[in-house]
Amino acid sequence: MDSLDIYKTLRKRAVRYVSEHSGNEWGGMLPVLEIMLPNLKELSTVSLGVVDVPIKKVRGTVAAGRASAFAGNFLPLLPGNSEFATKWESLYLAHRKDGINDACVGLEYLGQYYIIEGHKRVSVLKAVDALSISIDVKRAIPPDSADDLEARVYKEFLSIDTRIPLHGMWFSTYGAFTELYNAAKSIDAENSEEILFDAFDDFRMNYHELGLNLQPVTTGDAMLAYSRVYGLPYKRERSELVQNIKAIEKRLSFIFSPKPLETMNTFYGKYYQHAFILGALAGSFSLTGRIGWSEDIFDETALESFFDGVSMTNTRANVLGPEFAGQNVDIALIPYKDNGRSPGFPGVFALLAELTVPHGYVSEYYAAVSQDFGAFYNSMDPGLPDIHSVGSIPEHIELGLDTGFLRLHLNKSVLSPQTLRLVEILKNTP
């Protein structure tokens, strides 16, 4: 098929597109930014330089003058004997031979891109199903008065840096970007932006390879759901990433629901159960009667349960914390900070440990607590609701020792049979 035949075929597709979308806001034609924003010239702009943009994010044109030459999908509309068609065909042949190397010029607004120069380049690349296009971008900053959801999501990106690249990332809810950015910041505060977008690029590649990019949610939304279960997908093995993405697809049905989400069900761990048992163990093993606990392991309710457990087995014990160093503490509840990546303690976040006196070094551990939201979802009781549901009253469900979400690990090599029986009794106590 020569270039003219290709042009005619694409023009038929363009005409059909206009006909099928004639009832939409733009009548099947290209959206025009200067019509959408009559005050466009008054907006502040910042140059981003040449950016490799996902081509599906190229939404339309800046000026109305070029809109009539293209359908809303950027395929050509003008007749095959026009000068426009001749130039389009030449560009198409050049692309097939050497590729398109010159960047277009465009504006970014609310995460979408609008072309100033290079409409035919976009058209050719859209015609051959290219994934991305180079654009010399200026970003138009929304006015302070813009307060709809789309503008708020966009401003959330810009609150970090007005020049921050979006990398095709977008969310359907406000607060999502900040949540993921803080997750990256907790890994490395100085390189949080690089970590976040590296994680997103890896996630997006695998998510698209699985064919899930056609679902009616953004890839950013899907990564947010993934991260809430498995943590930020940064430097993860591909096999692990793919397996977990599939698990998310299977269990978190809200990601793929085309209906609006009206409510969120919440799941809480019964941390007080574990805290009480750990407290009972701490009280029974302490020789000095001085027991320490670190902050940021349990909430206040669970810590009260820890104190109650200590009192049950050692009424004379003195619980010190969180600054217990140098106070002759011989048993302590301490955080375990490996983000669940260690083969020895997967998912563990807290240890009940024996400390040397007076130096406070860990000499033995008696018990550990882990949490695994992903494993819970993979084996979740089908009678429980998904995280999101439509048109229902939110349910708030506590997950105890029997659900697999929270686990108590005992160092049976150092615990006596009597102690193990005590733990079993306490585990079965409401």
Image (tube, rainbow, N blue to C red):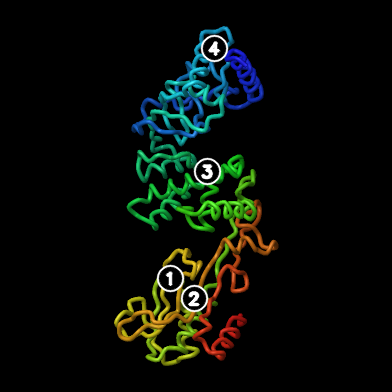
Residue 300 figure quarter: bottom left
Which residue is pictured at 36% across the width and 34% down the height?
Answer: 48
Give the Cα separation between the discs numbered 1 and 3.
32 Å
Between the C-alphas of marks 2 and 4, the distance is 70 Å
**Secondary element at image label 2:** strand
37 with respect to 9 (left or right): left
Q: What count of labels does the image hold? A: 4
Residue 336: mark: 1
Distance in Å between CA atoms under marks 3 and 4 = 35 Å
For the C terminus, which image quadrant? bottom right
Q: Nearer the viewer, mark 3 or mark 4?
A: 3
Dot 4 lies on which element?
helix
Q: Amino acid at mark 2?
A: Ala
Residue at x 37% of width, y 41% of height: 164
Mark 2 or mark 3, earlier in chain: 3
What amino acid type should be assigned to the residue bearing mark 4?
Ala
The circle drawn on residue 368 is 2
What kind of element bears circle 1? loop
Image coordinates of residue 30 in percent, x first then y, are: 54, 23
Nearest-to-viewer mark from 2 and 3: 3
Location of mark 4 (residue): 85
- Residue 376 location, x and y as percent? 60, 64
> Is residue 393 or residue 192 the one in the foreground?
192
Mark pair 4, 1: CA separation: 66 Å
Three-letter amino acid code of the residue under disc 3:
Met
Decide: marks 2, 1 in contact (CB < 8 A)? yes
Residue 424, compared with residue 29, is above or below; it is: below
